[in-house]
Amino acid sequence: MKSLLTIAMPKGRIFEEAAELLQKAGYVLPEELNESRKLILDVPNEHLRFILAKPMDVTTYVEHGVADVGIAGKDVMMEEERDVYEVLDLNISKCHLAVAGLPETKLNDIAPKVATKYPNVASKYFREQGEQVEIIKLNGSIELAPLIGLADRIVDIVSTGRTLRENGLVELEHIADITSRLIVNPVSYRMKDETIDTLVERLAKVVEEEQE
């Protein structure tokens, strides 16, 4: 009997766009897939199992082998630096990482503070700019930090920029463009190479067609 291929992915926008890609690639998925509250969903007809995880946890599940493959944002991969293979840029959930802050404010010369949920990315970026900053890790509502005097700058994902504008912030520096990637556990790639290669080839064809 063919073993299940386990795919870890976050719920929400990435899940919806990735599920659409899978369907265009010929995988038959149940319509209620994104509506379910279950955290593990089996699709026996396609020999697939989905683990629905927090975005930051997807790479961890794949690295430790509880998921064979995963779909994760490049931002998460940059932050986590896990031992996984990045095999395909799915070109979905496009956004970018940026430095933002209140308009016309200079970075504090004495003890500049940067709030972010990407401490590793932020530290590396400012180090490369030759700037020494104090990183304050937050898990949400990053835009609040400059408004309440917690930080001079924030490093966060920007999609439309609407959240920044609504909170009186402006984008100051562009760090990196972000899309979602297909990642693979190295051991799974050896054990289930045929199944994974088929998945990659079918998805790659769809991604290529959509870029034409």
Image (tube, grey):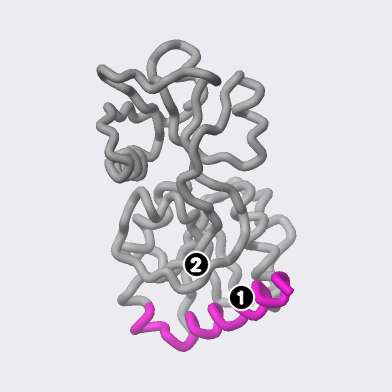
Q: Which segment did they paint magenta?
A: 189-212
Classified by dominant secondary structure, the portion drawn in magenta counts as: helix
Q: Which residue is mark 2?
A: 182
Q: Which residue is mark 1?
A: 203
Question: Are the residues at dot 1 and dot 2 in contact (C-beta closer than 8 Å)?
Answer: yes
Eyeballing the image, is 155 above or below 12? Answer: above
| Location of residue 47 in the rendering, given as x and y in whole percent from the top left corner | 55, 76
Is disc 2 placed on a helix, strand or loop? strand
Eyeballing the image, is 40 above or below 210? Answer: above
Classed neighbour count for the residue bearing mark 1: other residues with Cα under 10 Å, few (<14), some (14–19), many (≥20): many
| Location of residue 168 in the rendering, given as x and y in whole percent from the top left corner | 61, 19
Classed neighbour count for the residue bearing mark 2: other residues with Cα under 10 Å, few (<14), some (14–19), many (≥20): many
Q: CA distance from mark 1 to mark 2?
A: 9 Å
Q: Nearer the viewer, residue 158 or 9?
A: 158
Q: Nearer the viewer, residue 179 or 62?
A: 179
Q: Amino acid at mark 2?
A: Leu
| Farthest top residue in view | 148
Eyeballing the image, is 89 above or below 177? Answer: below
| Location of residue 84 in the rendering, given as x and y in whole percent from the top left corner | 34, 67
* Magenta stretch encompasses residue 122: no
Residue at (34% x, 84% y) in the render: 190
